[in-house]
Amino acid sequence: MSFDKDTIKPVEPEAVLTEDGYLFFRVSNGHYVDNPACADLGYSSLAQLTETVDIMPPKATAKRLADYHGWTQEELAHAISAIDHVYDAERAVKLANGREIRWPSAACTYVRVVQSGFELAYWSSINWQFASEKTMAAILVCSAGGKR
């Protein structure tokens, strides 16, 4: 579990991997489930889940999610390198494939693509200032699931 640097409150992860290899996702009602299609079943909190089993570190969870979601090697490498990045308030658009496009609530100085709480790619305003066509293509490809 990580902490929000401004409010010093726990930030619940969107996905966790147990020591025995089970993957759980946090769904909109706050429960952790192993199958997002059955959101009415599962653990009511991360605390309840951790009382039952040990949780794998975020890097191991990212590797498991990469297989589950079909992330590219580049997306997995970025997800692992960005595990500790913390952002201020953001706006987001959830896509049909489960990915999200996120940007800051204030001035739009970056765009990032996220899935299950892991950042898969990031572009700053400098990227689109100097390579707008390539940057837009990269954002769209990543948003679509890394497939061209």
Image: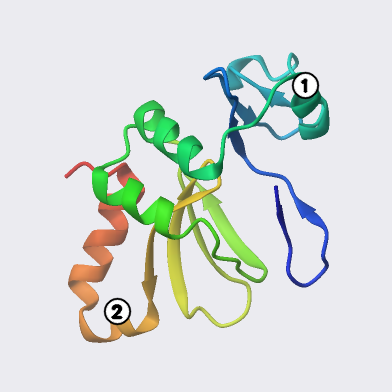
Q: Are marks 2 and 1 in contact (CB under 8 Å)?
A: no
Binning the other alpha carbons within 10 Å of mark 1 as few (below 14), some (14 to 19) or many (20 upward) gives some
Q: Where does the C terminus fall, quadrant-wise?
A: top left
Identify whether 143 is placed above or below 50: below
Which is more toward the observer, 42 or 36?
42
Taking the spot 32% from the left edge, 39% from the top edge, the residue there is 71
Q: Residue 60 has which mark?
A: none
- Quarter holding residue 39: top right
The residue that mark 1 highlights is: 43
Tell whether 147 sits left or right of 104. Answer: left
Taking the spot 76% from the left edge, 19% from the top edge, the residue there is 52
Taking the spot 60% from the left edge, 66% from the top edge, the residue there is 86
Q: Position of residue 53 (x, y in %)?
A: 70, 21
Point out the frontmost of discs 2 and 1: 1
Q: Residue 127 has which mark?
A: 2
- Quarter holding residue 55: top right
Tell whether 52 sits left or right of 82. Answer: right
Q: Amino acid at mark 2?
A: Asn
Q: Position of residue 90 (x, y in %)?
A: 62, 66
Q: Position of residue 147 (x, y in %)?
A: 21, 41
Taking the spot 53% from the left edge, 53% from the top edge, the residue there is 93
Q: Amino acid at mark 1?
A: Tyr
Tell whether 144 sits left or right of 43. Answer: left
Identify whether 39 is placed above or below 69: above
Which is more toward the observer, 119 or 8?
8
Q: Earlier in the sequence, mark 2 or mark 1?
A: 1
Q: Position of residue 20 (x, y in %)?
A: 56, 17
